[in-house]
Amino acid sequence: MSQLELFKHKNKSYEDVVSDLSAMKVVSDQNGLEIFKSEIFFALLHHKPDRFTVVDQVIKQAEEKGISYILCKVSAEAKKFRSYARQVKVERYQATAFIRLKPIDQHRVLMGEFEIKHQTGELITLHFMKRFPQYTIMLIFGEEVYMGRNKEIYKE
C-alpha cells in the first residue's frame, strides 16, 4: 500500500493538490512552495482525523494570502498544520535513530521494533531498505508488521 493512497480526499489525490499548488499565481518563491508541499505530505500522515480539513483550510489560505502566510504560522490553522507536520517528522526521525535492527537466523532478515502514533511505518521501512539493500527488513510497530524486500513493502 502506497502512502499516496492515504491522501485521497474529496476526490483529490496528493498529486492533484500539488499540481494545483504549482499552478497558483501567488507563488513567487519556489523554495517556499517546496517546503509547503513537504509540510502537506507530512501533515497528512498525522493520526488525527481532522488533518484533512486542516490541510484543506491551509490550502485555501495559501491560495488567498500566499504561502508565506502559512509558513509564518499567522493563522490558527497554519499553526496546527505546521505542528502536525513537525510531530510526524519528529516521530520518523526518532524511529530511524533509535531502532536497532537484529539479524534473524540465516535468512538475511533484519528485525526491529518501535511504537508509532502516526502513519509513518512505510517511511521508516523505506529508510532502512535504502540503508540495508541486501537484507529483508521486518519492522514491528505495535499491531502492525512491515516487511520490506526488493523495493516492495508488505504490511500485515
Image (spheres, rainbow, N blue to C red):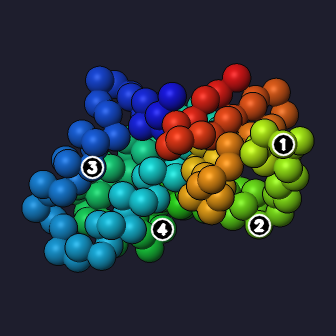
Nearer to us: label 2 or label 3: 2
Could you tell me how far apart the alpha carbons at marks 1 and 2 are, in whole angstroms? Answer: 25 Å
Q: Earlier in the sequence, mark 3 or mark 1?
A: 3
Q: Say how many tags the image has.
A: 4
Please state, as top left, top right, bottom left or bottom right, where the C terminus lies in the image: top right
Q: Give the quadrant of residue 132.
A: bottom right
Going 52% across and 52% down the picture, which residue do you hit?
42
Mark 3 surroundings: few (<14), some (14-19) or many (≥20) residues within 10 A: some
Q: Amino acid at mark 4?
A: Lys
Going 23% across and 73% down the picture, which residue do you hit?
30
Identify the residue position indicated by label 3 in the image. 18
Give SS at disc 2.
Answer: helix
Q: Residue 139 vs residue 8: left or right? A: right
Identify the residue position indicated by label 1 in the image. 106
Q: Are marks 3 and 1 in contact (CB under 8 Å)?
A: no
Q: Amino acid at mark 2?
A: Ala
Identify the residue position indicated by label 4 in the image. 73
Q: Earlier in the sequence, mark 2 or mark 3?
A: 3
Q: Amino acid at mark 1?
A: Gln
Q: Which of the numbered marks, if any, corresponds to residue 97?
A: 2
Q: Nearer the viewer, residue 125 or 134?
A: 134
Q: Are marks 1 and 4 in contact (CB under 8 Å)?
A: no
Q: Position of residue 154 (x, y in %)?
A: 61, 29
Mark 1 surroundings: few (<14), some (14-19) or many (≥20) residues within 10 A: few
